[in-house]
Image (cartoon, grey):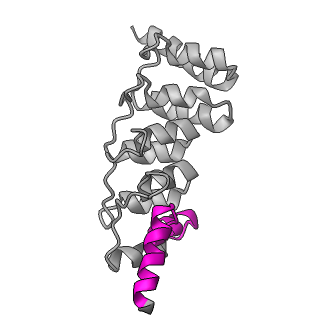
Amino acid sequence: MRSTLLLLVALGASAQGVDSPIHTAVQENDVEAIKRHLKGGADQNAIHPGSGQTPLMMAVLMGKEKVVEYLLSKEAQADVTIPEKDGYTPMHGAGFQGRAKIARMLIDNGIDPNSIHADGFTPIHRACWGRDVRHAETVRVFLEAGVPWDFAAKNGQTPLAMCKQRGHPMAVKALEEWREKSQKEL
């Protein structure tokens, strides 16, 4: 009877979005706990019942660099193609949150920085939405990875136009420098 009650409480908690142990370990930036959970049979691609995020996506959005590095490793082999509930992939999350080091890790692991979401935006467009230094650094990472500085989103805006509209001078400077460099190379 007691074990049945505990099971019902656990099922009820999961339905309400209580964190799984692996998601809790991600939030705590605890790579060793993640390793233990995976060795114990946890799924490195488990979907959080509330956020709809995998541990990798959660780590990307929270800026947990050590966790992202581990989840991308051959040991953990997280699936980088699993989107969160609204269809955003980890690369889009890195752009949106301005996670330059994480964007570089994803790119170094073969993830396409040019992926287009159903809304017509790429990760560099999402980086242009932010106004922090970290967003400008992320724009630079995307440019260095070969993302076109002039790619128009579904709404017709280029990253440069978006950054100007959002009042992000550091990202504008990075994009203008890249545009000038590209034009000189022609």
Q: Is residue 19 left or right of residue 36?
A: right
Image quadrant where one finds the N terminus: bottom left
Q: Was residue 22 drawn as part of the magenta stretch in this picture?
A: yes
Q: Who's the residue at 38% across and 41% down the image?
A: 107
Q: Name the spot of residue 25 as percent of width and height, x first.
A: 51, 69
x, y percent for residue 90: 42, 44
Please check the rendered image and state whether residue 160 is part of the magenta-colored stretch, yes or no.
no
Nearer-the-camera pick, 96 or 168:
96
Residue at image location 57% in from the left, 17% down from the top? 162
- Using the image, determine if residue 123 lies above or below residue 179: below
- Residue at 54% in and 41% down: 100
Q: Position of residue 27 (x, y in %)?
A: 56, 63
When the figure is inspected, residue 137 is found, relative to residue 99, above or below; the finding is: above
Q: Which residues are magenta?
A: 3-30
Q: Main secondary structure of the magenta part?
A: helix
Q: Is residue 23 left or right of residue 135?
A: left
Q: Image quarter for residue 130? A: top right
Q: Where in the figure is residue 12, as x and y percent of width and height? A: 47, 69
Residue extending furthest front?
A: 1
Q: Residue at x 53, y 68 (%)?
A: 24
